[in-house]
Image (spheres, rainbow, N blue to C red):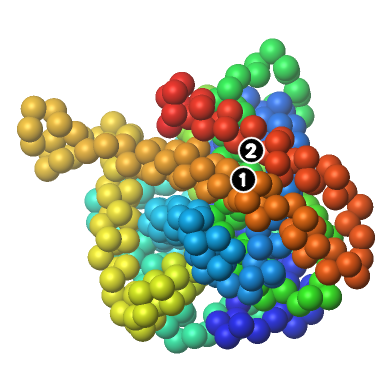
Amino acid sequence: MNKKRGEWSNHLGFILAAAGSAVGLGNIWKFPGKIGANGGGLFLLIYIIVVAVIGLTIMLAELAIGRSTQKNAVGAFHQLNKNWTFAGVIGIITLFVILSYYSIVGGWIMKYIGVYLGGAHFSGTATQYQDFFVNFITKPIEPVLWGLLFLGLCIFIIIKGVSDGIEKISKILMPALFILLIGTAIRSMTLPGAMEGIQFMLHIDFSTFNTDMLVAAVGQAFFSLSVGMGILITYGSYVGKQENLFQSAVWICILDTIVAILAAFAIIPAVFVTMGADGLGMGGGFAFMALPNVFASIPGGIIFGAVFFILLFLAALTSAISILESIIAFMSEEFHITRKKAVAWLFVPLTLLSVGYSLSQLETRGINLPWFDMRNGLQMLPMNAVMEKFTDNLMIPLGALCFCIFVGWVWGVKPAIYEIENEGALRFPLRKIWSFSIRYLAPIAILAILYFTIFKGVI
Ligand code: PFF
């Protein structure tokens, strides 16, 4: 992403850069876990519908705001209507919390790269992969150090201003990740015993429908597409006036969803093989627990595994950098401080949250931390679950709701469509449907989600 108000070099450059922000841990670490926890095929179907109908609607709205104002999220709202500046601020708060746990999981990936490159490979019983992972993330110090290393790397890249290079890497990264995922999915689906996992993914049983599933699908879709946090406003501000926003948004949604589905087909069958159906209850972390089993069954699996985790690391890095860049740009522009100072201010609270996230893995896995348990069983919150639900089920939908209301009712669909149609140079075929969606469908659906989250205790 350019730090000057530049433009993406071409159509593909923009789509790949936006896809680079969208494709990340959400697709490979979170998505398969969500499918596992929410009953398989039906969740997958709901997810795809949410992406196509609501995700795409909001993505287009964000891109239109960005290109029209040529500003970052907070600045854009401030310019269009000062009273709505808070909508951009909601996005920044959400990004801050996401980054705190994104770094810890980024650290887990670095650890796995080390494991594979060191050749200290797993072999033997299936549960070994699971034990190794749980053992590692529930250590008090080591995962924290890896997480801080990941965060430090992001900060280094941002301060050195070499993020342009990172964007260039993502042009190679995307296709490479794609090919590797296809290969891994094929191997995973052909492992002995994988059929059960494939059936789980494809079987749609409407009787299993529940509202938790809906909340999870919306939260996951927004997180994965990077919508509802203002990132795409910033990205939109770098898009040339001749660019077709609708087409680009469709492509970003398709690419992100294909990667998520491929990851699920690479991971879920392997979960069944490695841990059986009971493994689905483990929630996230499948990429770390199930994939090593797939790699172990491939000749040259150590190399395969190392390459996979390196690509996953780069995918996580491009997403994390886009998050950090947005926060730093906001702080330095709005508070008139240098980028270095902004990083310094950010570092302590971000580190504390990250450490809390990592340490709370111990609690949630039933390991008591005596030093957090000092006063009559007053225990540390299971911060990992709380933080992920706080962002996915509450803050991201809240941000997305504000964006919908703002574009649909405050700024107005007319100027937005004028922007989407390149000031009259092209025609947006779905203008009527989109207007209906941004004014009624998306906000009502999000309100329902927030209702379930707040009043039915999904959070
Ligand atoms: N969409 C990214 C993922 O799926 O991992 C996460 C993310 C990136 C969230 C950028 C927010 C963001 F601004």
Relative depth, front residue between 319 and 417: 417
Q: Residue at x 83, y 69 (%)?
A: 422
Task: Please tell me the numbered disc located at residue 405.
Answer: 1
Q: Residue at x 51, y 65 (%)?
A: 78
Counting residues from the start of the chain, the first of labels 1 and 2 encountered is 1
Q: Residues within 10 Å of mark 2 (few under 14, many from 20)?
A: many
In the image, 58: left or right of 383? right
**Residue 338, how many percent across, how many down?**
36, 83
Disc 1 marks which amino acid? Ile
Asked if residue 372 can be seen in this view, the reply is yes
Asked if residue 179 can be seen in this view, the reply is no
Task: Please tell me the numbered disc located at residue 443.
Answer: 2
* Vertical arrangement, residue 456 with respect to residue 97, above or below: above
Classify the position of the C terminus by image quarter.
top left
Give the CA distance from mark 1 to mark 2. Answer: 7 Å
* Vertical arrangement, residue 370 with respect to residue 20, above or below: above
Task: Please tell me the numbered disc located at residue 263.
Answer: none
Q: Quick check: marks 1 and 2 in contact, CB under 8 Å? A: yes
Q: Residue at x 45, y 86 (%)?
A: 160
Q: Residue at x 75, y 60 (%)?
A: 415
Classify the position of the N terminus by image quarter.
bottom right
* SS label for mark 1: helix
- Mark nearer the viewer, 1 or 2: 1
